[in-house]
Image: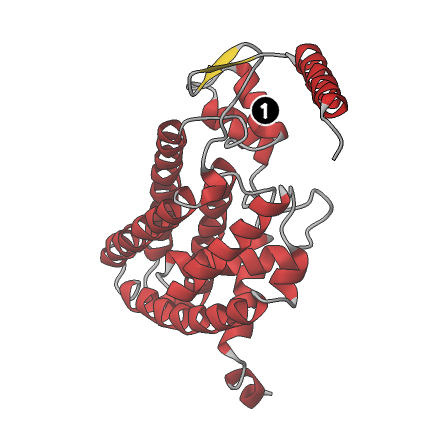
C-alpha cells in the first residue's frame, strides 16, 4: 500500500490537492457579488449589470479599471494568505505533521480564489456551478492551466490562450468542455498537472523546513508565501489581461458617431433607395437596343 502511494503519478497528486482546495469553505467566489463589489466605485450601475449578465469586455469597461480592480484583489489575497501562512508557522517542528498539509491546502485555496477573481474581471465565465461541492473536469482543467501560468509554464500560457480563443469565437458563457476534458487541450492539461505535482512536492518541503523553528519559522513562512504568491498572481493577471477575450467591445447606440459616420436607423430610406436603383437598372435594360 505504501509502495502504491510512492508510485502515485505527480499529476494525480496535484489534482487531488487542487480538488481538496477547491472544496474548502470560502474558496469559491460568487461571480455576480464579486463583480458588483469590485466595479462599484468605478462603473455605472448599467455597466455593472451588463458586465454581470454578459462580461466586463461586453460592457465596454476600460482595461485601466479592470487592472485597478485586479491589483486590489491581488493585494487583498496576498496579505490574507501570507498572514495565515505565518500563523501556521508559529507552533514549530512538533506541529509539522498537522500544519504543513493545512498550509499547502490553504495556499492552494487562495490561488483558486485569485484565479477566479482575475478570470471574472477579464471576461471568463463562471467556473463553478451552484450545485453541491462537485468540481467538473473542465473547471479542474482550466484551473490547472491557470496554475501553470502562475508557475510560468509556456505550454499553459499557450493552452489558456487557445481556450480563450474558442470562447471568443463561440461567444460562449461556459468553458469548452470537450477541449478541456478529451480534446486538443487535454494533453497539455495533463502535462501541466504533472509539472505542478513535482513543484508542489518541492514547495511542501521548503515550507516544512521554514516551520522547524517556532516564531522564526512564522516570519520565514509568511515571507516565503508573500514572495511566491504575489508574483504568481501578477503573472496570471498579465496573461489574462492580454488575451483578446478581455478586450472591451465597442458600444454603439443609435445616433452615435463611429469613425466619422453617424450610426442611425435609415432602413426605410435604404430600402426605398435600393428599390429605385433596381427600377432604374430595369428601365435602362429595356431601352437598350437588341442586337
Q: Is residue 278 left or right of residue 33?
A: right
x, y percent for residue 179: 62, 61
Which quadrant would residue 140 be assigned to in this image?
bottom right
Mark 1, residue position: 50
Is 237 situated above or below 291? below
User: Visible in this render: residue 165?
Assistant: yes
Which corner quadrant of the image does residue 30 belong to?
Answer: top right
Q: Residue at x 42, y 21 (%)?
A: 259
Q: Which residue is drawn at 47% across and 20% down?
A: 40
Q: Does residue 69 appear to the left or right of 262 in the view shown?
A: left
Element assignment for label 1: helix
Of 30 and 268, which appears nearest the observer? 268
What percent of the width, then of the height, locates residue 165? 53, 50
Between residues 227 and 176, which one lies in front from this camera angle? Answer: 176
Which residue is at a point 54% across and 90% down the rendered structure image? 3
Q: Position of residue 192 (x, y in %)?
A: 47, 68
Please say whether residue 136 is visible from this viewpoint.
no
Q: Name the quadrant of the C terminus.
A: top right
Taking 145 as reference, is 71 left or right? left
Residue that lies at the very extreme toward the bottom in this rendered image = 3
The quadrant of the rendering that contains the N terminus is bottom right
Quick one: 42 or 129, which is closer to the camera?
A: 42
Amino acid at each position: 500500500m505504501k509502495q502504491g502511494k510512492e508510485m502515485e503519478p505527480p499529476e494525480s497528486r496535484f489534482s487531488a490537492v487542487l480538488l481538496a482546495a477547491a472544496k474548502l469553505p470560502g474558496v469559491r467566489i460568487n461571480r455576480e457579488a464579486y463583480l458588483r463589489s469590485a466595479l462599484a466605485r468605478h462603473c455605472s450601475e448599467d455597466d455593472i449589470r451588463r458586465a454581470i449578465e454578459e462580461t466586463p469586455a461586453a460592457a465596454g469597461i476600460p482595461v485601466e479599471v479592470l487592472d485597478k480592480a485586479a491589483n486590489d484583489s491581488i493585494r487583498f489575497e496576498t496579505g490574507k494568505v501570507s498572514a495565515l501562512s505565518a500563523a501556521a508557522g508559529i507552533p514549530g517542528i512538533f506541529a509539522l505533521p498537522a500544519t504543513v498539509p493545512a498550509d499547502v491546502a490553504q495556499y492552494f485555496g487562495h490561488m483558486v480564489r485569485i484565479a477566479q477573481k482575475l478570470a471574472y474581471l477579464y471576461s471568463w465565465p463562471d467556473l463553478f456551478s451552484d450545485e453541491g461541492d462537485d468540481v467538473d473536469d473542465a473547471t479542474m482543467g482550466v484551473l490547472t492551466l491557470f496554475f501553470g501560468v502562475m508557475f510560468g509554464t509556456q505550454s499553459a500560457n499557450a493552452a489558456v490562450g487557445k481556450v480563450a480563443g474558442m470562447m471568443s469565437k463561440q461567444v460562449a458563457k461556459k468553458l469548452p468542455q470537450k477541449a478541456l476534458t478529451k480534446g486538443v487541450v487535454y494533453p497539455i492539461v495533463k502535462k501541466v498537472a504533472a509539472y505542478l505535482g513535482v513543484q508542489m512536492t518541492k514547495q511542501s518541503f521548503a515550507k516544512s523546513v521554514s516551520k522547524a523553528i517556532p516564531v522564526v519559522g512564522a516570519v520565514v513562512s509568511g515571507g516565503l508565501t508573500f514572495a511566491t504568491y504575489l508574483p504568481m498572481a501578477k503573472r496570471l493577471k498579465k496573461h489574462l489581461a492580454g488575451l483578446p477575450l478581455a478586450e472591451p467591445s465597442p458600444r454603439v447606440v443609435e445616433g452615435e458617431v463611429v469613425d466619422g459616420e453617424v450610426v442611425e436607423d435609415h432602413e426605410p430610406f435604404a430600402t426605398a433607395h435600393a428599390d429605385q436603383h433596381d427600377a432604374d437598372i430595369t428601365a435602362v435594360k429595356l431601352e437598350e437596343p437588341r442586337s
